[in-house]
Each structure stands twice: as structure tokens, then as C-alpha cells.
Image (spheres, rainbow, N blue to C red):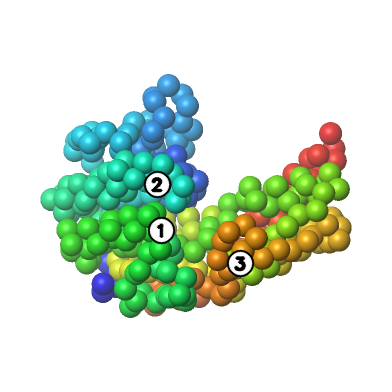
Amino acid sequence: MATRQAHTSSPAKTLIVGGDSPIARAVCHELSRLGLAWQATSRRKANGESDLADEQGAHAPIWLELAQEDALGSLETLDFDRCLWVAGISGEAACQRDPALARQVNVEQVARFAKLAARRKVFVTYVSTSQVFSAAQAPASVADTPHPESLYGELKWQAEQQLQQLLPADRLAIVRLAKVLPPHFERVGEWVRAARQGQSVHPFDDMELSPLSLAWVAEHLARLLQKRVSGLQHWVGERPISYSELCRLVFAHLGLPSSLIDPRSACSAGLAPLQGATLAFAAPAGFIKRPQTLESALAPLLEALAAKRALASEQ
């Protein structure tokens, strides 16, 4: 899939499909910061449950339930010329609970939207995952043909193929992401809570991640939409780190005793060890100069943990 960068000077509105996700909300914030108009869909009824309407530049969120086959009809009358698609049923467990529904939401609705986008000449950015590849393919390049090992990865790969078949290359960006760390990462929170109760924690020492911060991902997705940067891209952090190493960094940052860290193998939880980056970084020259450093990726997480500790100490 060729990579091109097209610029437009005309005002445009971006549609965010899947606006309730952390990535979508962060991108909405970045688009507002750039002064770009956007509108987002939400699975929450229009009864005040969604916080999207409060963002600068947004209209009230559009209720969209992709489990309904005719859901996309509500988008026909909207005015937009670019779209970020982050909607879907995420994770292997959720897909396995109802494979038919997962296929409808994650593949069939994507294909339906691609037809609408092709007809209206909309630029589409689709957020995908490193899970389209098998562990044996790591670090996978953009030239490698995916061989998913999970239903979730298979459905994401099928959606990618539908988009590539239905949209011209200069109006499509597919961004496969490595692990995205939100400022409040639940696994880290569990370690911290356990340690503060004097309990041992058991992070994996043979499973690694090459993290990206949520803020970094949102900033670059917003710029990608603004500049309409097309092509297949792999966004992955500069350096992999094991979960046990991450745990040690967090504990050192918070002054928690490292003696409570008792690393285990991923095999102990029935998981396959994974060492090294899952993806080989790939982005258009001049758009992203280099992968995010490990220090930069971890900074928002460590700052949030320190702020939470400071707040707790004041109470």
C-alpha cells in the first residue's frame, strides 16, 4: 500500500467513529487544540452520559450502535471529508463471546462504511493492531503478510483487506499500533495497590511491550488526519521493556519496596512468552521522524501515579 501525503487548505470536519474510546477522546482533544472541527459517534444515549459534547468544536455526539445492521444510515446526512475509525469489539475474550456479532461490528460494518466513504471521497484512517501478526513474525514489517493467531486479530486483518479493496490508496491510512499506555494503566494500578498492602506482585519477566503513550498516539493521529497522510504504518515504541522491568521502574518512582516484586514466566498464566518488538516501526519520511522513546512513553504514566500518591498523602 503506497504512502502519500496530501495537503488541503479547505476547512474540513472529521468524523470520529467510536468516540467513547480513550484513543478517540484524546484525538478529539488534539483536533480541538489544532482548531479543527470534528464530530464523534457514541454508543451512549443522548442523555448526558457522554462527555464528548463539551469539547471545543464538537456538536452533540451521534448515537451509533454498530450491532444494528442499518446503523450507518445515520451518517449519510453528516458533513465530513475525513474519518477516524476506532470503533469495534476489542480483545479476544469479547470476540469469542459472540463471534458472529464481532464479525458484523469489526468487519461488515467497516466494509459498509468504506463504500459510503468511497462514494463521498472521504479520507479514512483505520486504527488496527499488532495482533494481525503471529508471534513468530515479530518484529513484523509493513511488507509482511499478516497471519493472525486470534479471532480478534483475524477480524482486524479482514477489515484492513476490505478497506484496501474498497478505497483508493491515497484516501486510506491504516495504522497498526503496539501497546498504548494510558496514564491510568490498570495493570500497574493493581501492582501499586497490592504493594501498598504489603503483598507481592508477579509481573512477567518474559513478556515484553514496546509502549506508546496515549498522548503521543493522539497527537500523531490528529496530525495524520489534518494532513491526510495515507499508507500503511506501524507505530511502535523505540525500545521493548518487560512487564517486570516496568514494575521495577514504577516501584522505584513511587518509593515502593522492590522486594515485593516476584517475577514469573508468562507460561505460569497459560500465555506464550513474547520478547522483543511485535512490529517494525514504519511511517512516512518527514511525518514521524523517529519512534517514541521509552522515557517519553512512560512519562505520563509515572506522572499520573506520582500525582495520585501526592493527592492521597494530603487526605
Q: Position of residue 283 (x, y in %)?
A: 40, 73
Crowding at mark 2 (Cα within 10 Å: few <14, some 14-19, many 20+) = many
Q: Evaluate if marks 3 and 2 touch, with contact meaning CB atoms under 8 Å apart.
A: no
Image quadrant in which you'd find residue 171: bottom left
| The C terminus: image quadrant | top right
* Residue at the spot of label 3: 207
Ranked by sequence position, the earlier of labels 2 and 1 is 2
Seen at 56% across and 61% down, the residue is 271
* Residue at the spot of label 1: 150
Q: Position of residue 259 (x, y in %)?
A: 86, 61
At numbered mark 1, what does the secondary structure look like: helix, strand or loop?
A: loop
Q: Position of residue 65 (x, y in %)?
A: 32, 34
Look at label 3 and name its amino acid: Met
At numbered mark 2, what does the secondary structure look like: helix, strand or loop?
A: helix
Q: Position of residue 214 (x, y in %)?
A: 54, 55
* Residue at the spot of label 2: 95
Look at label 1 and name its amino acid: Ser
Q: Can the viewer see residue 254 in this picture?
A: no
